[in-house]
Amino acid sequence: MTDQHAPHAPDARRCSFFFDVDGTLAELQPRPEQVFIPASAIDALGQLQAAGVPVAVVSGRPIEQLDQLLSPLQLPAAGVHGAERRHIDGQTSLLNVDLELMAQIRHELADQCSRFPGLRLENKGIAFALHYREAPELQPNASALAQEFATRYEEALVLQPGKCVYELKPRGASKGEAISAFLEEPPFAGRLPVFIGDDLTDEAGFGVVNRLGGLSIKVGQGDTLANWRLDSVKDVHRWLAEVLTALFDPPPASHFLQESKGSP
Ligand SMILES: O=P(O)(O)OC[C@H]1O[C@H](O[C@H]2O[C@H](CO)[C@@H](O)[C@H](O)[C@H]2O)[C@H](O)[C@@H](O)[C@@H]1O
């Protein structure tokens, strides 16, 4: 990683923007249900969209939750790490998932998790997250349990480590695939992709964006495929404000974006 700053916020008229949510648009919180996106950031995203700039959110959360977090804005969205995708026309595509098997897995996981008070099971219907943020001492147990289920149900599930969480996502779900698919469709197609994310699940998106010569931006520390870096969620919000300023006024220099080097 270098300290080199990006020269300018990109020209939004030429870009398609993809934003991760937790740790990027929203500060992390002890519990998933405590998360919120500041109204100013929602407003900024709405202004971009209203100006005809394609904007989508790409998250590990289900789209239903993304709509609540972004209310009153409703954006094209990829949820559950790309397993669900809502297009610009409001139609949603879903990965083919065996719902009966997922219900059985949920049952078994809930049963296993009850052995570890403090370990929180987030049930997303077609994916599961084992959160240990509030009980860090349970990290090895969460890891072992997630690994056991990923192995036992390898035809259906893939282990996705995250921040104080081990997620079991449906096989085939990928943020990279979701961003690729958006970029094949109007209004995203033919524009420079910009993707901002903070976590391991975002690396697949960074890879896709890099191959297309776009702007990949990692929030915070850690090895990454991303070419640029922002230090914090607050810097994401400031950078977003810069993008808007550059869209409506002459572009100012960016003081927040730093070039990043290193692989995950
Ligand atoms: O892809 P994202 O939008 O970044 O979502 C990733 C996961 O975020 C949530 O978990 C994380 O954020 C929580 C709230 O800040 C935090 O408590 C937890 O430790 C983090 O792992 C969410 O609960 C997951 O469903 C998302 O997949």
Image (cartoon, grey):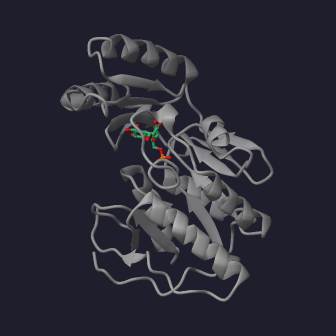
Placement of the N terminus among the 4 image quadrants: bottom left
Instruction: From this view, report whether residue 177 is shown above or below residue 81.
Output: below
Q: Can residue 104 be seen in this view?
A: yes
Q: Where is residue 196 in the image (x, y as percent from the top left)?
A: 49, 63
Q: Is residue 14 visible?
A: no
Q: In which quarter of the image is residue 45?
A: bottom right
Instruction: From this view, report whether residue 39 is shown above or below residue 245.
Output: above
Which image quadrant shows ligand 1?
Answer: top left
Picture residue at 33% right of the left edge, 35% below the top: 166
Picture residue at 38% right of the left edge, 77% below the top: 258
Q: In which quarter of the image is residue 119?
A: top left
Instruction: From this view, report whether residue 247 is shown above or below residue 189.
Output: below
Front residue (pair 183, 226)? 226
Q: Position of residue 229 (x, y in %)?
A: 39, 70
In this picture, residue 210 sits left or right of residue 74:
left
Instruction: From this view, report whether residue 77 is shown above or below residue 237.
Output: above
Picture residue at 40% right of the left edge, 58% below the top: 203
Picture residue at 56% right of the left edge, 58% below the top: 19
